[in-house]
Every structure is written in structure tokens, then in C-alpha cells.
Image (cartoon, helix red, strand yellow):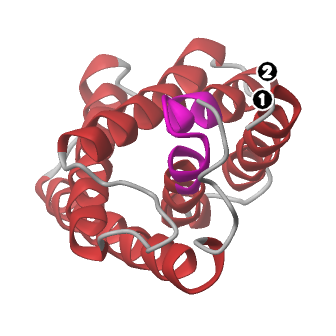
Amino acid sequence: MHKAERLIITALFGSVIFVTRVFIPPPIDKLLIVVDAIFLVLGALFLKKWGATSVGAVGGVLTGLWRPAVPFSFALVFIYGILVDILLVGFKVKASSNGVDQNRLIVSLSISTFLIAVISYYSTTIGLNIISANLILDIVVMFMGPLSGAVAGYAAAYLWNKYLRNINIDNYEN
């Protein structure tokens, strides 16, 4: 893939993450982690090496510039991209013209979304003391993290296998 194409995909997907983080009011923006996850995974599938991390970095920088807590906003989206990339490699999720393994994608995205949900929840409750931790919120985070990841994994696999796998990625360089 040429550098210009990589840049366009990274900027486009990162911008969508920025919009879901900044212009959607809370608590709906937290539910849109599914959208963020889909674009991180598609970035990883299209761009291969560190694709989700690149998309997360762009989304994080844009979000960080808009919000007053610049390092925190950037860090969470960036870490999420790193987690997605690492777990996709760990579960050997490969993009090809034959499709992507749906089950592996769902499991890897469920774990990465669970991890970022826990990291962001506990950093805001314990680290920054923005909200107070309680059992109900703990349960919601522990349940919704993997569920959101599974939904996003299914959606990304469906999109890739139904519509995007036919895009000629075999000739792209990494």
C-alpha cells in the first residue's frame, strides 16, 4: 500500500474515532466503543503492521487536542490500538481475500475491549478519582467490555468477509 493510501485510511478511521469521542454526548459516547473497535480492527486489517495503533494514535491526538485532559484522552485511544494490534497478532487473525476468521477476531477484540474498559474505568476511579467506584459500575464494566468487543468483532468480521475482502490487498506492501 502506498504511503498516501495508508495515510488516508489512518486519517479517515482516526477521525471517526475522534467524532465518536468528542461530538457524541455522554453516556452515549461510551456505548460507541463498538464503532471505535470496528475502525481499529479495520485499520489493522487494511494496514497490517501496527494499523490499529496508527489509527488509535490519530484518533487519540485529535481527541486529546479537543479535550482538556490531553494526555489521558490520547493515552486511552492509543493503548486501545496497541491492545488490538497485539491481540490480533497473538490470535493470528490474518486479513486475506478469503476472509478473516470470525471467531478469532471476536475473541481477540473481546479481550482487548475488556482490557481497555478496565484500564479506563480504574484509571478514572482510582487514579484520577473522577468518579467513585462501586459494585454496580464494576459489574457493568466487566460485562459490557467483552460484550462490546464481541459485537464489534462480529461486525468487523462481517464487513470484511462480505464487502471488504474483495479489495485487492495482496499487492500492498507493508
Secondary structure under badge 2?
helix
Residue 173: give x, y in percent of width and height: 64, 33
Q: Which mark is residue 22?
A: none
Q: Residue at x 72, y 20 (%)?
A: 68
In the rendered image, the residue lying farthest to the top is: 71
The nearer-to-camera label among 1 and 2 is: 1
What secondary structure prevails in the magenta region? helix
The three-letter code of the residue at mark 2 reads Leu
Q: Which mark is residue 62?
A: 1
Classify 10 Å Cα crowding around label 1: few (below 14), some (14-19), many (20 and above): many
Q: Which residues are magenta?
A: 42-56
Label 2, on which residue?
65
64 vs 101, nearest the viewer: 101
Looking at the rendered image, the quarter that the C terminus falls into is top right
Q: Residue at x 66, y 47 (%)?
A: 171
105 vs 167, nearest the viewer: 167
